[in-house]
Amino acid sequence: MTKDIATPIRTQEIMAKHGLTFKKSLGQNFLIDPNILRKIVSQAGLTKESAAIEIGPGIGALTEHLARDAGKVLAFEIDQRLLPVLADTLSPYDNVKVIHSDILKADVEQAIQEELAGFEDIMVVANLPYYVTTPIILKLLLEKLPIRGLVVMLQKEVAERITAKPGTKAYGSLSIAIQYYTEAEFAMTVPKSVFMPQPNVDSAVIRMIKRPDPIVQVIDEDFFFSVTRGSFVQRRKTILNNLQSAMPNGKAKKELILQALDEAGIDPTRRGETLSIKEFGLLSDKLYPHFR
């Protein structure tokens, strides 16, 4: 078995050999603890019949653990300087394909068809760059890709928001958007000390398994999401006040909003954070005829 990439000494050796520095603009914090990597990968439940998609492989620390467990790894790396490094560090593994691309601009579905044909079980497993965590997760879910789910490391605060339940301070439109498509669970906290360089924020790993169907059936998904976003514009305000501000011509349509709230069985003095996803689904369907 090859020496793990994810140790402080080996990471420094690789950086020195290739003349690398950490790029703050790309949120590069490399993992230097193999135990944490094993725990992350175990959350994905991979076998040799599975494929893994990684975003931002860096110097290959997580990639090699994925390559050991999965049948194939498809990694997207935005930083051109890292391509020769990955070719070197991952040379012991013949089941890794690295694509030089910004994941937010990549045609992931086409890459899956070309590189992962024949794999029924596909998981996204990644240490995401913290400054673009949310757009990446939402892109992967909204594109309805043939994946079982995602296991990602991200900022602890964002992990808490994604997995939050109604009635908690962290619960908001992000919780709803992701829990609409997936069952999201907080898997573990990751200390700053296992990164090089150490980030300024605490990290966490969450597991999101895609639901066979969204948690609620709504008339119009885009409208549903606009209602949920609008309901949290000012957290301290009531659902009625927020919807009046957020919906087109909302103040003039106050009576219609009140009618929709009444039909959905929702007290207009409640705050958005107290509504379940099912209540939001019902409310958006009642509002839809008045605002479509």
Image: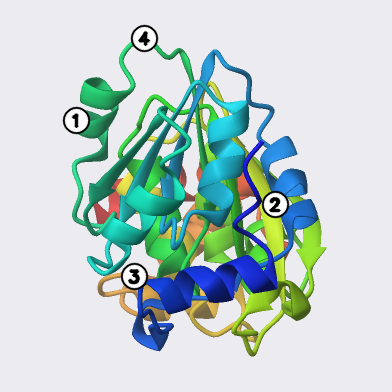
Mark 2 vs 3, N-terminal side: 2
Mark 1 vs 4, N-terminal side: 1
Residue with the mark numbered 3: 247
Residue with the mark numbered 4: 118
Please report contact status of discs 2 and 3: CB closer than 8 Å, yes or no.
no
Instruction: Decide: few, some or many residues near mark 1? Use Cα within 10 Å; few <14, some 14-19, many ≥20.
Output: few
Please state which of residues 235 and 264 is positioned toward the viewer in this rendering.
235
Q: Quadrant of residue 254?
A: bottom left
Residue 82 badge: none
Mark 1 vs 3, N-terminal side: 1
Q: Report how far apart the C-alphas of labels 4 and 3 lie in the structure.
A: 45 Å
Mark 3 lies on a secondary structure that is loop
Residue with the mark numbered 1: 110
Q: Position of residue 126 (x, y in %)?
A: 52, 52
Q: Amino acid at mark 3?
A: Met
- Closer to the observer: label 4 or label 3? 4
Q: Position of residue 186 (x, y in %)?
A: 76, 53
Residue furthest to the top: 118
Q: Position of residue 193 (x, y in %)?
A: 76, 79
Name the residue at 50% across, 20% down: 71
Q: Report how far apart the C-alphas of labels 2 and 4 lie in the structure.
A: 26 Å
- Closer to the observer: label 1 or label 2? 2
Mark 2 vs 4, N-terminal side: 2
Mark 1 lies on a secondary structure that is helix
